[in-house]
Image (cartoon, grey):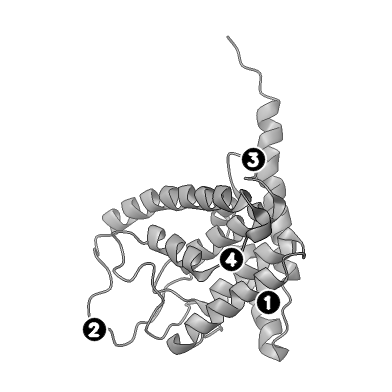
Amino acid sequence: MKERTEKERYSQPEEIRVTEDPDEVARLEGRNGLLQFDEVKRLIQDSLRDQSRFRLRPSAILRLNGVALHDIERQGGTYRTCGMTIEGSGHIPPVAEDVPLLMEEMCDYVNENWTRSALHLAAYVMWRINWIHPFVDGNGRTARAVSYFILCVRMGSILPGTKTIPDHIVDDKQPYWKALEKADDVWKLDEFVDVSDLETYLKEMLSRQLLTVVEAAAVTNVQ
């Protein structure tokens, strides 16, 4: 199924994309994906030095998007200044003028509800970033990276496993999209946060990640 992060762009003063060559974009996205994960690990390590002072801040999210779009989009690491649509979804993201405040409110929710479960907080930021769609591109990648960052910090460690939750999601996005849409529908009804389906989904993805550790432990090395 086609990736659903494509969007309709409105008036822009300059060309947004640095390169339009699809092969070069694919190469850069692969490189940037590795760099973004390195940045996630750095953020986790820095945050775990003193968890009592941890706060999710928009600057960290902007940084992760900037890494994901380095050499691809000129507006990487900044909030969008244009309207946005999401192909294949009935959700219309908020206008650009509202994005900075909405992102601050999202961070406030995480910081004020830090005693809630790691899965709830990870699911919340994954849904909310997708709902706000604050960037010209890379919204899904950034949402998954921030979600994993929050999950690890809340659990107190960089989680083991050779294939992480974001990797598992990329392998099969249908359940991911379905869980996001469920949260969208509930919010649209009465602005109530219900990410329970996404929590269940992330729990399954976490189980898959940790299973790779169990499988590795059972491997016999032949000398």
Q: CA distance from mark 3 to mark 2?
A: 45 Å
Mark 4 vs mark 2, CA separation in Å: 32 Å
Q: What residue does disc 4 label? A: 56
Which quarter of the figure has residue 127? bottom right
Dot 4: what SS?
loop
Q: CA distance from mark 1 to mark 4?
A: 21 Å
Q: Quadrant of residue 57?
A: bottom right
Determine the CA span between mark 4 and mark 3: 22 Å
| Residue 91: x %, y % from top left | 56, 83
Does residue 1 appear anywhere in the picture? no
Query: Please, is residue 42 above or below residue 63 in the view?
Result: above
- Circle 4: is it few (<14), some (14-19), or many (20+) Cα within 10 Å? some
Crowdedness near tag 3: few (<14), some (14–19) or many (≥20) residues, C-alpha within 10 Å: few
Task: Kindly tell me whether residue 176 is visible in this rendering.
Answer: yes
For marks 3 and 2 on the same chain, the one whose residue lies earlier in the sequence:
2
Q: CA distance from mark 3 to mark 1?
A: 28 Å
Residue at position x 77%, y 64% in the image: 115
Q: Which residue is mark 3?
A: 160
Q: Label 2, on which residue?
A: 13
Q: Nearer the viewer, residue 72 or 5?
A: 72
The C terminus lies in which quarter of the figure?
A: top right
